[in-house]
Structure formats: C-alpha cells, structure tokens
Image (tube, grey):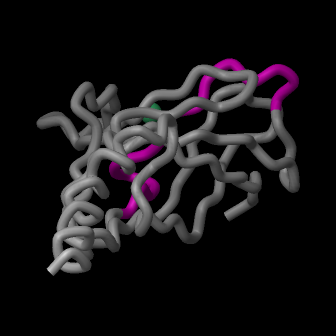
Amino acid sequence: MLFRRTMIAALAALPLLAAALPGRAADGITVTDAWARFIPGARNGAVYLTIENKGAAPDRLIGAEVKGAMAEIHESKMAADGTMNMGPLPDGVELPPNTPVMLAPGGVHMMVMGLDPAPKVGDRLAVTLKLKSGDLSIEVPVEKR
Ligand SMILES: [Cu+2]
C-alpha cells in the first residue's frame, strides 16, 4: 500500500517538475530538414524546416531568435491581385501532436533580418525556436536550393 501511494505521489509531481525546468522545450519536439536561404549578399533571408510534436500535448511555435539578427515567423499569401505578400503571424503556428508542420518556401517561414555580414552558403545560423513549452536551440545551414 505504501508503495502504491508513493507511486501516485511521484506521478502527481511530474507535471510540476517539467514546469520547473525553465527554457527547455517539451520532449518530443523534433526538427528535420532545417535550412536557410539568403540571396548572395542579402542580409535578409528565410529559414525553412519541418517540426513535429511527438508528445501528447499540443504545443505552439511562437517565435524565434537568431544570433545577430531579428527573426519573425511569417506567412506568405497570394493576394487577390496575384501578388505574393508576407507578414508576421502574431500567434505563431499550432503544433498538434503527431502532425508534421512544414515551414517552406511560399508558405510559413522564419524571416531572418539584418544579419551582418550577409551569410554565405555553408554558414550555420544559431537559431532558438521559441515554443509554448520552452526553447529549442538548433543550427541551421545556409544552403543553395
Ligand atoms: Cu517573410
């Protein structure tokens, strides 16, 4: 009986422990195929990646930090007149469990602004993804695609 009670107490304490670890995203958030595109000489570019929440609880990509630059989560949209517009997504991107979410050219992307000097193909950007559950740091190579 005592053992069982201890188990229940330990389980009840788990969410508190997770909440007490500051700054770290939930386990089960995976990032694949991360890359950045900058036109040669440009200080503004975009980061693309696929992010999947393999945990049980919904999460959210709220924003991002890029060392030496400003970063925002943006969405590109086709306007009625056929031109492409883009702007920030103030609420970020929902990450439902077990649903890969792609940041890809022509859609949602991470806008990176003001890198100095302009990055070159082969450089790696230090990116921190700001999630509702915490932070996730990744390295993103600048590629020519
Ligand atoms: Cu943008």
Give the residue drawn at x 86%, y 44%: 120
Left or right: residue 44 compared with residue 75: right
Query: For residue 128, what is the image quadrant?
Result: top right
Query: For residue 33, what is the image quadrant?
Result: bottom right
- Range drawn in magenta: 102-118
* Quadrant of the frame with the N terminus: bottom left
Comparing 70 with 127, the one in front is 127
Comparing 38 with 22, the one in front is 22
Depicted 58 relative to depicted 126: above or below: below
Depicted 108 relative to depicted 6: above or below: above
Left or right: residue 93 compared with residue 24: left
Give the residue drawn at x 21%, y 75%: 2
What x and y, as percent, mark residue 117?
87, 24
Depicted 83 relative to depicted 5: above or below: above
> Quick check: which quadrant has ligand 1?
top left
Left or right: residue 120 compared with residue 58: right
Give the residue drawn at x 45%, y 55%: 105
What x and y, as percent, mark residue 26?
40, 55
